[in-house]
């Protein structure tokens, strides 16, 4: 049922969004006359590597710097890239990955292998479902670039401050996923573009309904500064690389 839902909604979405995608493709291409797409290897369901397509928001060969996490002040982001990342247009083209079955509309965001190799046994449960374009964490940490801004080691900061909560939010989705929840999270994602505080409140309310721990709900409100925290299934206080 979920696969049929993903198939038809992604097909419809590609058709509706095609004028926007074509316009952004042209803008990205005119910037440096290189491909408007970035094909990124990601770890999918059952740890299978797939090719995730994104609208390119960075300079050519930006991935060869060895840095996986991206702050909002990352010098690799192009002028057009700042705009498309702000409104998540770079991820809209991933409807193609949903259409062909590599991804789902809703599910834990796919990660690079260097990061999934750090997963605890508990976190590896995230790899038992298709990764998605959006989920709880996509809304809660839509400002990920701002969180990492100014960090000397963005990857380390990501693993200390963001990954522990992204993984917990992802596991809550895995344990409670349904078409109804998918529809809610898609709606919350759209709301977050125009009214993020309202979207966060809706997310927290849904987390409470699903019996999420209090500390996860507090983080989802995003009212306090993030501090290093262990990932689920780990006794480490700080994740070290």
Image (cartoon, grey):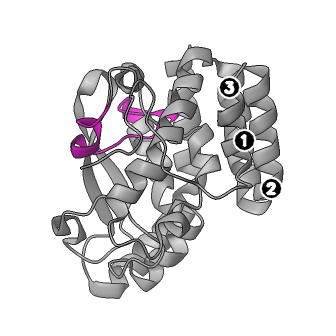
Tag 1 secondary structure: helix
Position of residue 158 relative to residue 188, above or below, is: below
Q: How many residues crowd mark 1 within 10 Å: few (<14), some (14–19), many (20+)?
A: few
Q: Which mark is residue 213?
A: 3
Quadrant of residue 19 within the rendered picture: bottom right
Tag 2 secondary structure: helix
Question: Is 24 on the left or on the right of 226, as rendered?
Answer: left
Label whose residue precedes the other's in the sequence (1 or 3) = 3
Label whose residue precedes the other's in the sequence (1 or 2) = 2
Tag 3 secondary structure: loop
Tell me residue 119's x, y (percent): 31, 32
Q: Which mark is residue 197?
A: 2
Tell me residue 225's x, y (percent): 64, 58
Q: Which mark is residue 218?
A: 1
Q: Tell me where the magenta segment starts and ends, as one range.
A: 99-119
Question: Is 133 on the left or on the right of 36, as rendered?
Answer: right
Q: How many residues crowd mark 3 within 10 Å: few (<14), some (14–19), many (20+)?
A: few
CA–CA distance in space, label 1 to label 2: 14 Å
Quadrant of residue 81 within the rendered picture: bottom left
Position of residue 223 relative to residue 217, above or below, is: below
> Residue farthest to the left?
64
Residue 42 belongs to the span the image colors magenta = no
Which one is in front, 38 or 12?
Answer: 38
Quadrant of residue 196 within the rendered picture: bottom right
């Amino acid at each position: 049922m979920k696969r049929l839902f993903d198939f038809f909604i992604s097909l419809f979405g590609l058709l509706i969004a095609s004028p926007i995608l074509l316009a952004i493709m042209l803008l990205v291409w005119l910037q440096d006359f290189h491909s408007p797409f970035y094909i990124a290897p990601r770890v999918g369901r059952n740890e299978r590597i797939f090719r995730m397509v994104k609208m390119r928001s960075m300079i050519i060969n930006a991935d060869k710097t060895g840095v996986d996490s991206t702050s909002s002040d990352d010098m690799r982001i192009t002028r057009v890239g700042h705009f498309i990342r702000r409104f998540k247009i770079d991820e809209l083209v991933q409807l193609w990955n949903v259409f062909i079955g590599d991804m789902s509309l809703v599910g834990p965001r796919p990660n690079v292998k260097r990061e999934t190799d750090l997963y605890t046994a508990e976190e590896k449960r995230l790899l038992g479902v298709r990764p998605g374009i959006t989920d709880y964490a996509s809304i809660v940490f839509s400002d990920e670039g701002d969180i990492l801004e100014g960090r000397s080691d963005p990857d380390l900061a990501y693993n200390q401050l963001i990954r522990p909560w992204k993984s917990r939010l992802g596991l809550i989705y895995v344990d409670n996923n349904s078409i109804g929840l998918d529809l809610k999270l898609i709606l919350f994602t759209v709301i977050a573009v125009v009214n993020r505080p309202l979207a966060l409140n809706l997310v927290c309310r849904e987390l409470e309904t699903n019996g999420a721990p209090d500390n996860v709900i507090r983080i989802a409100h995003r009212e306090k500064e993030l501090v290093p925290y262990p990932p689920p299934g780990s006794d480490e206080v700080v994740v070290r690389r």
